[in-house]
Image (cartoon, coloured by chain):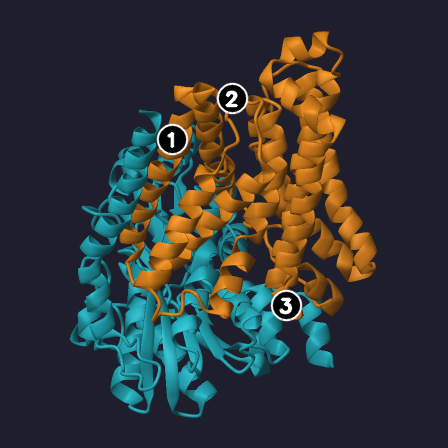
């Protein structure tokens, strides 16, 4: 009896480790920066707004990594989808432009998925390749020139607007988090994703269409990247081929810090969002502390290593 | 046992955070003394505490990396006989740029226009994506085509010495944009450097800021925090001009950046601590996009931004009377064209000037079309023309 109770206790604590790190970092900056506006409403909304794109992409990446694959092409998809919708907005309505941008994500994900699952090449290599091709495409369609967006409705809906005191970026993050969480945790599809990532052959033998699952999760990942592209375009009132290029590592870090197992089979959407916010808080807090860029990088690296060792350590002990 | 280990790890996290705060407490205290954390009375930042010595930036023009004097680009010309002589040579050229974008397109267009006139074929173009290793690869690859000329922008002056040595050994006519290369001398390994008027641009931006603010106000200074000749010259002469010639304008907040895509975070933090700011200077256009996004999010529609280089997104904002007030720009089309002519000098056996400077322009809504025509040899995008017509 005592053994079982202890085991349940330790299991729950492990689940909450990422939230503990989040609270610790929040407390730390809240106390040391209380005169510098860290906990002000405006600053908190800043962090939530700035992390929105990474959070949205982390939702898609959580599905992919949980299924045992990975998607390295999200950065390039962001740029291409942003440029395509910006170009579409010149002659068409907001709805058409949004669908065009999302269609980019759908097609990229489909290509990634089919080559990975049917041609049987590791997702790492496939998405590495498509990343280059999509990047090149993004550069050519406007010959490297930026495309401004003057459509106020688009800009309001996808990044620059506020509903009450909440940025539309934040609202999108909440909506997509809820959808992602329910999909991954409460549906047969979500269970199939876990099974595919946990043990692909066992999943296949128990009737899971693992090929189809892998294609779908890669589509989900590229769709969230396309969505992030729309948010970038709305936030900056324009698109440029460099959008999203620095985000891949941040997205993967958010997912891993959040508790999703890199080897597959275990995923948490909420954890990934918390992971993304932790990194946004770190960036924001270290900036407000007045550190130079180099000092910020060192501090951020050390804190992330410690936070990750904390959550990863737990898994090894089991 | 397990719980003890977890507790230990938690304590380690707290300790690490506390330690990082303590060891960085010194620098944040410095920043506090240098800048202002008190919203009630903002004090101007002391430039000396940032390592900026304004006496070093007092000359009219920047000197070249080896101390060369600046020569205006209009001095680099070719006579009709010289043009004919080059045409007879059937030479080839490679364009190996450091990055890509509207500015580099300007360089390419300018260079190609002159090359066409001279009957020189461009056999290779590449963009090193700001990676010194990729630039070395680009050089090796291009040399396989045995070009007579290479026009380039060295990504990193230190590693470029090694990267361009094969081109030097092959006797290629090398012309640099913006940067020199450590250990290389003009007339020796390379012909010369063509660049913009950095000091003039920094000072021009200061004048634009004063214009935007009506001569007085408090501003933020977002500069490129790296040892990079071009931006250091421009950024620091801006700060010095403000400090020396505009006593009623105070720089109250300073923040460096190294990634142009992360400036929104930098600007948001600045606005949290200095909500009274009237204007912000940003080192260049793409970095300014994030700053403007931050201003929009904070509802700060009156804060004016001044930066360098043209760019479609911010130019549209400028024309629509948004946050972007003005920019100083160099003329990439002229830089590219001048570089091509300098290469021709070497082929003719003529001695070229070592450090050549093109004109600058101060750009606001009123002369934006002229700016695009002169700097990039094209009209601004249709959105900008439409907005101007309204």
Q: How many marks?
A: 3
Across and down, in percent, residue A156 comes to 69, 66
Q: Residue B240's mark?
A: none
The image shows residue A79 at horizontal and vertical percentages of: 61, 47
- Nearer to us in this view, A197 or B7: B7
The chain that appears cyan in the image is B
Q: Residue under circle 3? A: B380
The residue labelled by disc 1 is: B140
Tag 1, which chain? B
Q: Residue at x 55, y 24 (%)?
A: A124
Q: What residue is pinned by disc 2?
A: A263
Tag 2 and tag 3 share a subunit: no
Please state if B186 lies on the left or on the right of B319 as rendered: left
Residue B53, visible in the rendered structure:
no
Which quadrant does the N terminus of chain B fall into? top left
SS category of the residue bearing label 2: loop
- At a point 55% along the width and 32% down the height, the residue shown is A72
Q: Residue B26 occupies which quadrant of the picture? A: bottom left
Tell me what hue chain A is rendered in.
Answer: orange
Residue shown at the point (18%, 71%) measured from the top left: B49
């Amino acid at each position: 009896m005592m053994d079982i109770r202890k085991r349940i206790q330790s299991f729950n604590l492990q689940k909450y480790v990422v939230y503990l790190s989040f609270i610790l970092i929040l407390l730390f900056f809240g106390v040391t920066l209380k005169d510098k506006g860290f906990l002000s409403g405006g600053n908190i909304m800043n962090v939530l707004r700035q992390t929105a794109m990474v959070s949205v992409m982390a939702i898609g990446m959580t599905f992919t990594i949980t299924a045992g694959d990975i998607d390295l092409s999200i950065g390039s998809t962001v740029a291409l989808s942003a440029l395509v919708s910006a170009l579409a907005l010149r002659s068409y309505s907001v709805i058409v432009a949004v669908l065009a941008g999302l269609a980019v994500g759908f097609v990229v994900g489909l290509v990634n998925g089919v080559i990975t699952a049917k041609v049987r090449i590791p997702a790492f290599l496939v998405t590495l390749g498509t990343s280059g091709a999509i990047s090149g495409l993004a550069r050519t369609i406007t010959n490297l020139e930026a495309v401004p967006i003057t459509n106020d409705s688009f800009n309001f809906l996808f990044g620059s607007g506020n509903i009450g005191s909440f940025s539309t970026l934040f609202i999108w993050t909440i909506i997509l988090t809820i959808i992602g969480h329910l999909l991954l945790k409460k549906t047969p599809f979500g269970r199939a994703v876990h099974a595919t990532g946990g043990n692909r052959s066992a999943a296949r033998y128990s009737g899971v269409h693992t090929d189809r699952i892998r294609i779908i999760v890669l589509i989900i990942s590229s769709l969230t990247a396309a969505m992030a592209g729309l948010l970038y375009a709305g936030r900056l009132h324009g698109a440029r081929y460099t959008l999203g290029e620095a985000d891949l590592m941040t997205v993967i870090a958010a997912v891993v810090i959040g508790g999703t197992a890199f080897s597959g089979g275990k995923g948490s959407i909420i954890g990934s969002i918390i992971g993304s916010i932790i990194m946004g808080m770190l960036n924001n807090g270290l900036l407000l502390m007045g550190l130079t860029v180099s000092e910020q990088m060192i501090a951020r690296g050390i804190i992330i290593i410690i936070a990750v060792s904390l959550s990863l350590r737990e898994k090894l002990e089991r | 046992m397990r719980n003890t280990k977890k507790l230990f790890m938690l304590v380690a996290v707290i300790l690490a955070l506390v330690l990082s705060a303590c060891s960085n407490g010194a620098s944040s205290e410095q920043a506090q003394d240098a800048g202002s954390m008190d919203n009630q009375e903002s004090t101007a930042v002391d430039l000396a505490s940032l390592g900026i010595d304004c006496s070093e930036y007092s000359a009219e023009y920047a000197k070249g990396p080896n101390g060369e004097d600046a020569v205006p680009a209009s001095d680099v010309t070719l006579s009709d006989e010289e043009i004919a002589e080059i045409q007879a040579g059937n030479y080839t050229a490679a364009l190996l740029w450091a990055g890509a974008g509207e500015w580099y397109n300007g360089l390419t267009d300018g260079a190609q226009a002159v090359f066409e006139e001279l009957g020189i074929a461009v056999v290779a173009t590449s963009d090193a994506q700001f990676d010194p290793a990729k630039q070395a690869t680009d050089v090796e690859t291009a040399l396989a085509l045995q070009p007579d000329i290479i026009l380039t922008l060295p990504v990193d002056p230190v590693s470029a010495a090694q990267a361009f040595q094969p081109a030097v050994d092959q006797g290629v006519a090398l012309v640099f944009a913006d940067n020199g290369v450590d250990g290389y001398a003009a007339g020796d390994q390379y012909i010369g450097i063509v660049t913009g008027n950095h000091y003039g641009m920094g000072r021009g931006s200061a004048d634009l800021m004063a214009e935007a603010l009506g001569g007085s106000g408090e501003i933020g200074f977002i500069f490129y925090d790296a040892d990079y000749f071009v931006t250091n010259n421009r950024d620091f002469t801006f700060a010095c001009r403000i400090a020396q010639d505009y006593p009623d304008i105070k720089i109250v907040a300073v923040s460096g950046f190294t990634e142009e895509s992360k400036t929104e975070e930098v600007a948001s933090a600045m606005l949290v601590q200095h909500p009274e700011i009237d204007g912000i200077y940003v080192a260049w256009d793409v970095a300014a996009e994030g700053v403007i996004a931050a201003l929009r999010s904070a509802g700060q529609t009156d804060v004016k931004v001044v930066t360098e280089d043209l760019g479609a997104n911010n130019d549209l904002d400028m024309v629509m009377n948004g946050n972007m007030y003005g920019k100083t720009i160099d003329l990439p089309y002229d830089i590219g064209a001048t570089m091509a002519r300098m290469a021709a000098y070497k082929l003719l056996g003529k001695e070229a000037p070592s450090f050549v400077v093109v004109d600058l322009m101060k750009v606001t809504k009123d002369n934006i079309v002229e700016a695009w025509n002169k700097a990039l040899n094209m009209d601004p995008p249709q959105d900008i023309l439409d907005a101007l017509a309204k």
